[in-house]
Image (cartoon, rainbow, N blue to C red):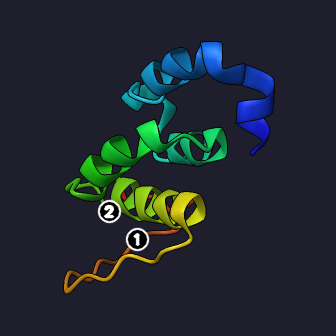
Amino acid sequence: MIAREIAGPDLTPHVLELCSATALGAQRWCLLASLGSPQALPILIDAMRSDDPSTALAAAAAYRRLTGQGVDSERRISVPPPDSYDP
């Protein structure tokens, strides 16, 4: 877990707080998974409930990366490509 090696245990709360910034987008969950801290799990579970498909998908991927367990759901979503533009 690269972020854990860089941040160390003393910076874990700061990384957790940083990942709450929605301005960082859905990919902030990758950083959270890299932290390797079980403290990230409640945050990821909450993010998986998001109405924003990109956020929910990225949080589920980070959860899987952190725990090694997939997330089953009856809910299916369609996520547009990141470069898509719909005027």
Asked whether, in this view, residue 51 is left or right of residue 64, the answer is left
Image point (40%, 71%), residue name:
79
Name the mark on residue 35. Answer: none
Say which of 80 and 60 sits in front.
60
Where, quadrant-wise, is the N terminus in this rendering? top right
The residue tagged 2 is: 53
Residue 34 shown left or right of residue 67 in the figure:
right
x%, y% of residue 16?
47, 26
Q: CA distance from mark 2 to mark 1?
A: 6 Å
Q: Given the image, on which type of amino acid does mark 2 rest?
A: Pro
Q: Is residue 34 above or below residue 4?
A: below
Q: Secondary structure at mark 2?
A: helix
Q: Are marks 2 and 1 in contact (CB under 8 Å)?
A: yes
Q: Residue at x 47, y 30 (%)?
A: 19
User: Which residue is at a point 27% across and 55% down the rendered structure image?
Assistant: 52
Rendered view: 86 above or below 4: below
Read off the residue under disc 1. Answer: 79
* Quarter-of-image position of residue 9: top right
Mark found first going from the N terminus, 2 or 1: 2
Relative to 47, residue 16 above or below: above
In the rendered view, tell whether residue 26 sits above or below residue 23: below
Looking at the rendered structure, the kind of residue marked 1 is: Val
Q: Categorize mark 2 by other alpha carbons within 10 Å: few (<14), some (14-19), many (20+).
A: some
Q: Position of residue 47 (x, y in %)?
A: 30, 49
Is 22 left or right of 1, judged from the image as shown? left
Residue 62 shown left or right of residue 86 in the figure: right
Secondary structure of the residue carrying tag 1 is loop
